[in-house]
Amino acid sequence: MQRQDFRHGVRSVGGAITGELSAGTWKDFFAAALRRAFDTLTAITGLSITITGSGPTWTVARSAGSWITDGVKVGHVVRLTAGAFNAANLNKNMIVIAETALNLTVVLFPSIAGLVAEGPIGSATLSLPGKKTFAPPSGQTDVSFSIEHYHQDLTLSELFLGCKIDKMALALPPTGMATISMDFMGKDITTAGSQYYTTPTVITSTGVLASVNGILQAQGGTLATITGLSININDNMSAEALVGSNTYGDIAEGLILVDGQVTAVFDSGTMRDYFINETEVALSVAMSASNVAAADFLAFTLPRIKFGGADKDDGQKTLIQTLPFTALVATIDVFQIWRTSKLQLPRSIFML
């Protein structure tokens, strides 16, 4: 009247990797989670540019052509990199918060000195630094990773095979470092007495991102009362056991579902009414690695979200409302990520 034996079933691998956000560091994982490789963004040359405004917003106007046709999107980070501009206007990260064919409305990262009104300036170049990706409607990539845990003191290697990203979570606190967490689902493990990846890529040296060096905007307006933001990407991976095999034949991708949460000071009914009225909201966030005008950055855009609640605390302090949201499929392409980077999430989410 005791258990006679115990056997393993189908092998599987699971685990998490966590860290602090920095431009370019996580690009392979972002591309895998969104199932699309990054694109380099092409600079727009031969422009005649006029800058107007007095801050905190400025207008960058061109005399002919179309920003929209040339691929500039709301949420992109752009720079003026050539032309006889005042030095105050050159090589500064500018976040696009609104656009028409001829006009870009932009804001600068915190602590960066404002622009100077001038123009028209001929032979100008507007650059879109970094790289961009998004979750495509078709032609998705199917990427898995082999992840090694090498115990140098024991001279033992554990190589986890066929690992795919099941979930990715981004946390942007009001103070402190922005963080990333990824949950993996894998197929198998091999062990050895020597290191498998003997010449791994050197760790990136880009600066860590912090929300205090960032801009958060909704519906084209900069938000100054946000106390926190989280974004979750769920790739809904699954696997089926096969008769006669102790490993899964494949790990299959499901829908890319994106949700998250915004916490904000309750100082008006604007965001509450977004929830009550089921208003579709465009949400973008961009963070830089320092106060340098052309610092490395990471940016995310969710072109269509809906809030699913608007709860408020009720303590003897500043009232904070919590607004969970769900991201929807975008009707336009948006996003950037790399050293100076851009990334777009499920056509419902974007990252730079």
Image (tube, rainbow, N blue to C red):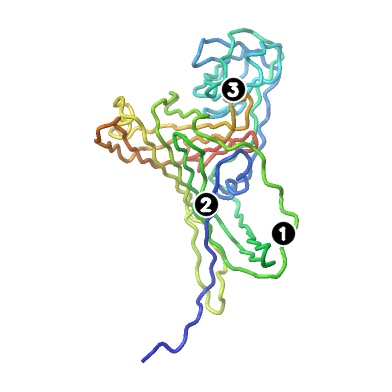
Residue 332, position in %: x, y?
51, 34
> Crowding at label 2, few (<14), some or many (≥20) Cα neighbours within 10 Å?
many
Q: Seen in the image, is 154 located left or right of residue 239? A: right
Q: What residue type is labelled 2?
A: Met
Residue at disc 2, secondary structure:
strand
Q: Nearer the viewer, residue 233 or 290?
A: 290
Residue farthest to the bottom, as pictured: 1
Q: Which amino acid does label 3 sit on?
A: Trp
Residue 86, position in %: x, y?
66, 10
Quarter in which the N terminus is drawn: bottom left
Residue farthest to the right, as pictured: 199
Give residue 30's mark.
Answer: none
Residue at disc 1, secondary structure:
loop
> Crowding at label 1, few (<14), some or many (≥20) Cα neighbours within 10 Å?
some
Residue 260, position in %: x, y?
41, 42
Q: Nearer the viewer, residue 166 or 63?
A: 166
The Cα atoms of the two marked residues, 1 and 3, are separated by 45 Å
Q: Mark 1 points at which residue?
A: 197
Q: Which amino acid does label 1 sit on?
A: Tyr
The Cα atoms of the two marked residues, 2 and 3, are separated by 35 Å
Q: Do the residues labelled 1 and 2 touch (CB within 8 Å)?
A: no
Report the residue at 58% width, 26% height from top: 291
